[in-house]
Amino acid sequence: MNERLTFIPLPVVYPGASAALGANYAYITTCVDMTIIHVSAAPSTNDADVTLAINDDGSAVVAAFACAVAATPGEFSSTAVGGTSAPVFVAAGSKLSFTATGTANGTQIVGLITALVGEVFG
């Protein structure tokens, strides 16, 4: 196996003081095959109902997970890092989008995707 660990920051989007994040609030395109093994995310302020999901070309690949407490990031953890979820393969050229639900107006989400690139679990 010839894998490399990489970290991808979640896109930070300020929706404005009178707007909330929602479905597909940001997009990125992948340039290489990769396998998502962990995601950590938190809102800019405590917000009891916040969840985050990651979509690959419109289909949910990282199911919504709670990330409601600013000081305690929510996590998606695959078996590759001791979690219970399957690692998520993403093909080169895929368009990833991010969906946040339950955010109050003006709330941002910050976080980090940990992925393997190279010979992946595809």
Image: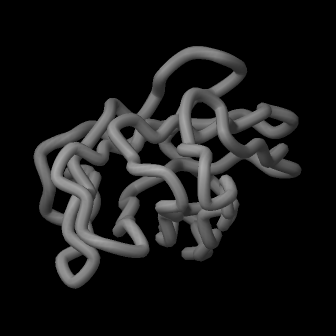
For image coordinates 78% across by 32% down, the residue present is 94
User: Does 16 sit left or right of 104 as displayed?
Assistant: right
Give the residue drawn at x 59%, y 75%: 7
Q: How many marks?
A: 0
Residue closest to the far front: 18
**In the rendered image, which quarter contains the C terminus?**
top right
Q: Is residue 92 above or below residue 69?
A: above
45 or 67, nearer to the observer: 45
Q: Quadrant of residue 93?
A: top right
37 up-or-down from 73: above or below: above
User: Residue at 79% across / 48% down in the picture?
Assistant: 28
Q: Position of residue 22 (x, y in %)?
A: 54, 34
Residue pictured at 16% horizontal, 53% vertical:
48
In the rendered image, the vertical position of residue 34 relative to residue 111, given as above or below: above
Q: Position of residue 9 (x, y in %)?
A: 62, 72
On the image, the x and y values in percent for residue 74 come to 23, 62
Q: Name the side, left or right, on which 47 lies relative to 37.
A: left
Give the camera-side residue of 32 and 49.
Answer: 49
In this rendered view, identify the residue nearer to me: 77 or 118: 77
25 sits left or right of 112 in the view: right
The answer to whether one can see residue 77 in this image is: no
The colouring scheme, among rainbow, by chain, secondary structure or one colour, is: one colour
* Residue that sits furthest to the top in the current view: 59
